[in-house]
Amino acid sequence: MSKYVERFNTRERVLHWFVTVTFFTQLLSGLGLFSRLFVGYLDLFGGGQGAIMVHKYAGILFLASSLLLFLNHRKEISTLDDDDRVWLSKLGGYLSRDTYEENNGKFNAGQKLFGIFMGASTVILGITGFVIWFPVLLPRSLVQVSLLVHGLIFVLFIMFVIVHIYLATIGNPGTLDGMLWGRVSRIWARKHHVKWYKEITGQEKAS
Ligand code: HEM
């Protein structure tokens, strides 16, 4: 019997990494536009005009791919069951020394909330982004509110993405394998997503 189980297929992995590349392109091209503190980042794009151009067109790619990623996972993340509520009440056991036996499906409650946040934020960034794109066609107050909301959501998004990257790498060793190679070890799957493991293998144990 193989030591591994499939976690993500090729299409899901390509989509996730495409979203990641467009997300960081948006981050780098947007930083200099967001605050004078980061004005040096504009040089990466040959100046302000270049950064704006990249931010607009990579933004369309981010919007489309991030929404696709959300839709791809929507069935797995759209409901919270009793085990998810326990996970949330214990904050996944991350802030306690007590051992806690997680009983997660394919995604834990934190991942579900992150996925929902990502979908909702992408829509808000997209709408406010289009308003900012055409400032002379729309009321000035709408453009100003959009600039504020666009910046606030960006700050929240980057905070959640930093936590996401930490938890998906050094916070939980073995997790990245699924997004790199498509498969995770049975031991990892049994430990972090026992309900999902039992569902896909029909087995109680990891060996
Ligand atoms: C270097 C950057 C990133 C790394 C290393 C990374 C890593 C991962 C890994 C390993 C998983 C699978 C988790 C599992 O099997 O349980 C995952 C899932 C996911 N990632 Fe990322 N990711 C990165 C960037 C991003 C970005 C920028 C976004 C969104 C803008 C994103 C959105 C998601 C979503 C929605 C999922 C599925 C649900 C979840 O696990 O929360 N990721 N990521």
Image (cartoon, rainbow, N blue to C red):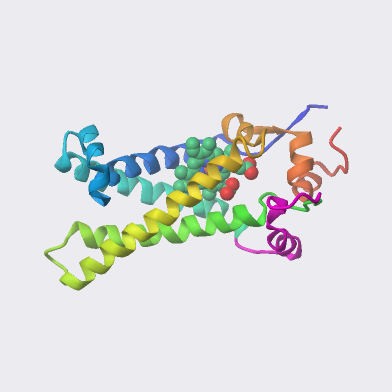
Magenta region includes residue 85: yes
- The percent position of residue 98, horizontal first and vertical second, equals 80, 51
Q: Which part of the image, by quadrant, shows the C terminus?
A: top right
Magenta region includes residue 86: yes
Q: Quadrant of ligand 1?
A: top right
- The percent position of residue 14, horizontal first and vertical second, equals 49, 36
Position of 123 with respect to 2 (left or right) is: left
Residue at horizontal 53 percent and vertical 59 percent from the top:
116
Question: Residue 145 occupies which quadrant of the picture?
Answer: bottom left
Is 11 located above or below residue 33 in the figure?
A: above
Residue placed most toward the observer, 204 or 9: 204
Is 50 located above or below residue 97 in the figure?
A: above
Question: Residue 52 occupies which quadrant of the picture?
Answer: top left
Is 90 located above or below residue 172 in the figure?
A: below
Residue at horizontal 78 percent and vertical 50 percent from the top:
195
**Residue 12 visible in the snapshot:** no
Farthest left residue in view = 136
Position of 88 with respect to 156 (left or right) is: right
**Residue 142 visible in the snapshot:** yes
Q: Which part of the image, by quadrant, shows the N terminus?
A: top right
- The percent position of residue 117, horizontal first and vertical second, equals 50, 59
| Image label count | 0
Give the residues drawn in magenta, as a range.
Answer: 78-99
- The percent position of residue 159, horizontal first and vertical second, equals 47, 51
Residue at horizontal 65 percent and vertical 57 percent from the top:
109
Position of 182 with respect to 122 (left or right) is: right
